[in-house]
Image (cartoon, grey):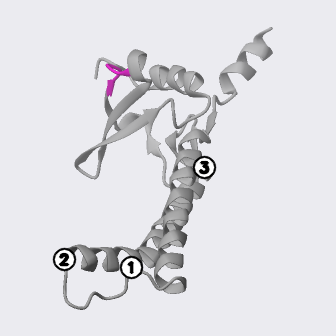
């Protein structure tokens, strides 16, 4: 019995929180709309020949020309940026263990660096804010239940590790 209790004490508590897919999927949907808009602008301006530079100059026709000519370039570029952001966001993992908390591949924040725990929006929105000291500057680590899986386990571990009375 004593050996079991020792093993339990020595066992490191670790919570791995992969990213939820919902935020990334929303970015992908928005990126698809931008791609469709860019394709529409490309077809209208470059294939059908609509919305050419207006002669004589007219502001309304000129704005349509700019929108269709440069929308064919800007909308797909914005879509690519959103897709990259979504993929990066969906691949992130938050790891909390005995050493500290942080995203995989980045430096962890030690538990003793945390100054306060703000759980005012935890019940209503599922957001937990942790204030910590990083090289003399106060920073905030925001944990969001919409963006992280295993959120309840994470909150339990954070409450154990970060003393509220600091």
Q: Which residue is mark 1?
A: 70
- Number of numbered discs: 3
Q: Residue furthest bottom?
A: 55
Q: Which residue is mark 2?
A: 59
Element type where label 1 sits in the image: helix
Q: Report, in whole angstroms, how far the alpha carbon at label 3 lies from the one at label 2.
A: 43 Å
Task: Decide whether the magenta segment is chiefly helix, strand or loop.
Answer: loop
**Front in this rendered view, residue 150 or 84:** 84
Label 2: how many Cα within 10 Å (few below 14, some 14–19, many 20+): few
Disc with the residue nearer the chain's start (3 vs 1):
1
Q: Residue furthest front?
A: 56
Please give the name of the residue rendered at 26% of the width and 80% of the height, measured from the top-left corner.
62
Say which quarter of the image contains residue 96. Answer: top right
Q: Report, in whole angstroms, how far the alpha carbon at label 2 lies from the one at label 1.
A: 16 Å
Residue 122 position within the rendered picture, expressed as x and y whole percent measured from the top left: 40, 20
Which segment did they paint magenta?
A: 117-121
Which of the image's four quarters has the C terminus?
top left
Residue 140 position within the rendered picture, expressed as x and y whole percent measured from the top left: 32, 40
In front of the other: label 3 or label 2? Answer: 2
Determine contact: label 2, label 1, CB under 8 Å. Answer: no
Question: In the figure, 134 relative to 69: above or below?
Answer: above
Please give the name of the residue rendered at 23% of the width and 73% of the height, measured from the top-left corner.
60
Which of the image's four quarters has the N terminus?
top right
Element type where label 3 sits in the image: helix
Disc with the residue nearer the chain's start (3 vs 2):
2
Along the horizontal axis of the image, is 8 left or right of 135? right
In front of the other: label 2 or label 1? Answer: 2
**Front in this rendered view, residue 64 or 10:** 64
Q: Which residue is mark 3?
A: 90
Label 3: how many Cα within 10 Å (few below 14, some 14–19, many 20+): some
Q: Is residue 159 magenta?
A: no
């Amino acid at each position: 019995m004593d050996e079991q209790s020792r093993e339990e004490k020595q066992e490191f508590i670790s919570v791995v929180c992969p990213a939820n897919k919902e935020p990334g999927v929303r970015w992908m949907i928005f990126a698809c709309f931008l791609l469709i808009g860019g394709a529409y602008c490309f077809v209208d301006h470059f294939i059908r020949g609509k919305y050419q530079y207006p002669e004589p100059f007219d502001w309304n026709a000129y704005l349509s020309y700019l929108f269709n000519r440069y929308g064919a370039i800007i909308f797909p570029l914005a879509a690519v940026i959103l897709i990259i952001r979504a993929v990066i966001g969906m691949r992130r993992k938050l790891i909390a263990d005995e050493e500290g908390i942080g995203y995989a591949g980045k430096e962890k924040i030690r538990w003793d660096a945390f100054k306060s725990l703000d759980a005012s929006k935890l019940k209503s929105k599922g957001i937990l804010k942790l204030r910590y000291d990083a090289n003399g500057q106060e920073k905030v680590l925001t944990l969001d239940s919409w963006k992280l899986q295993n959120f309840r386990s994470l909150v339990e571990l954070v409450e154990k590790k970060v003393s509220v009375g600091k």
